[in-house]
Image (spheres, grey):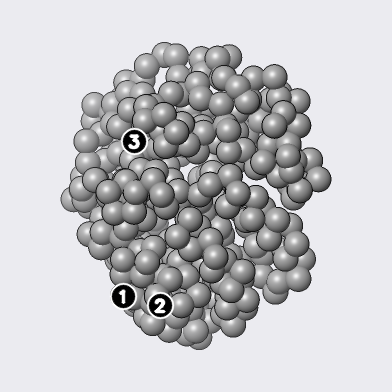
Amino acid sequence: MKTTITLVHKNCDRGCRICAYGGMRAVDYGEVRRTIETLMRQNYRVHLYDFFVKKESLALFRLTRQFEGKNPGWLNVTAEFAPDAGDVAYLNSLRTAVAISLHGSTAEVHKRSSGQDDYVAIVQFLESFHRRFELRLGLNYVVSHANIGDLEAMLSFAERFKLDFLELIPLGFSGNAVHALGRDAVLTAADKRVVHALVTQRRAMLPYRLELDAIWGPDFVNDPAPQCRFFAAAVPGTYCNAGINHWAIRLNDRKVFPCPCMASIDALAVGEFDGEKLQLEPNWLDHKTKIEAPCAGCSKFSECQGGCRLTAMSEHRVAHGSDNRYAGFSGCLYHLAGPNGVGPGDIL
């Protein structure tokens, strides 16, 4: 199985309140290209995780070819995304979807989460999308304690846009959210139960696919055999592919992380890229044998091995103020919602 390396490149200076990558700096596109070419010469499958897609980004996507084959990821854009005719033709040939973020069914709710006044521009982008592109269209909605009450309204509001999918992403306690929103914005166990119940009840009625982002972790209810496929192929026998067939390089300082979504938490770095080779600590995967309760002893542990490590550790940070790669996943949907989707789970 070919190893994927995702280059985390925060080339956006918008400073959204919920951005997990707020402390990162942009890197010159020439340096990004050199890094891609170096890694591809070593037979890695290289992906670029870009935050603000520009013409330079599209040139690099052509180089990596990451959206040309069967690929679980999509192209995340902003309302300013306006490719020229040549780039539109290229985009329409790809096997991916375009996704844009909107974090509320009203301008007020969206701004409460993002801090941005771009609600109208995003709605206009969604309404005009199918006149401009042939690609599938998705919507990212970051769910927090601040907008959980808007979620049901959002599911109905989104029906007007002819979406292919709506992705629900749980707010993590990292990046800008730490100082801009604080821990009170992080989802509670009760919030998670609301999300899971709503997805279970509404999914079949909606004209688009309603999805839970992989960092929610497994629930074994709506998906009987869940696995994370974030930019890399799923690995048999585990939920999280981080540090198995997938690594990430934070380009502004070349720190290496098991997963690109972990790149906002310095304590989770497991090595560095020296410009030529990955220098990795040898024991990242030891956590599989040391994961603590409630994962230890869970009837599903052999299938998921601790679920999404990012979210498990992020929730440990909220509860205890420290980082622990062996932390059990106390907020796992399987435990919160239970085998029948109504909770509690098998060990709570």
Residue at 67 percent across and 41 percent down: it is 336
Which of pointers 1 and 2 lies earlier in the amino acid sequence? 2
Q: Which residue is mark 1?
A: 117
What separation in Å lies between label 1 and label 2 (alpha carbons)? 7 Å
| Label 3 CA crowd tier, 10 Å (few <14, some 14–19, many 20+) | some
The C terminus: image quadrant: top right
User: Which mark identifies residue 107?
Assistant: 2
Secondary element at tag 1: loop
Q: Give the secondary structure at mark 3.
A: loop
- Look at the picture and state if 136 lies above or below 43: below
Q: Quadrant of the N terminus?
A: top right
Distance of label 3 from label 1 (alpha carbons): 28 Å
Where 7 falls versus 181 (above or below)?
A: above
One can see residue 274 in this view:
yes
Q: Do residues under tags 1 and 2 come within 8 Å of each other at their CB atoms? A: yes
Whether residue 233 appears in this view of the structure is no
Q: Residue at x 72, y 28 (%)?
A: 347
Q: Residue furthest right?
A: 340
Count of number-bearing discs: 3
Separation of marks 3 and 2 at Cα, in angstroms: 30 Å
- Residue that carries the numbered disc 3 in the rendered image: 265
Which three-letter amino acid code belongs to the residue tagged 3? Answer: Ile
Which residue is at 26% across, 55% downward? 11
Task: Residue 267: name its quadrant.
Answer: top left
Q: Earlier in the sequence, mark 3 or mark 2?
A: 2
Front residue of this view, candidates 342 and 95: 342
Picture layout, residue 282 above or below residue 172: above
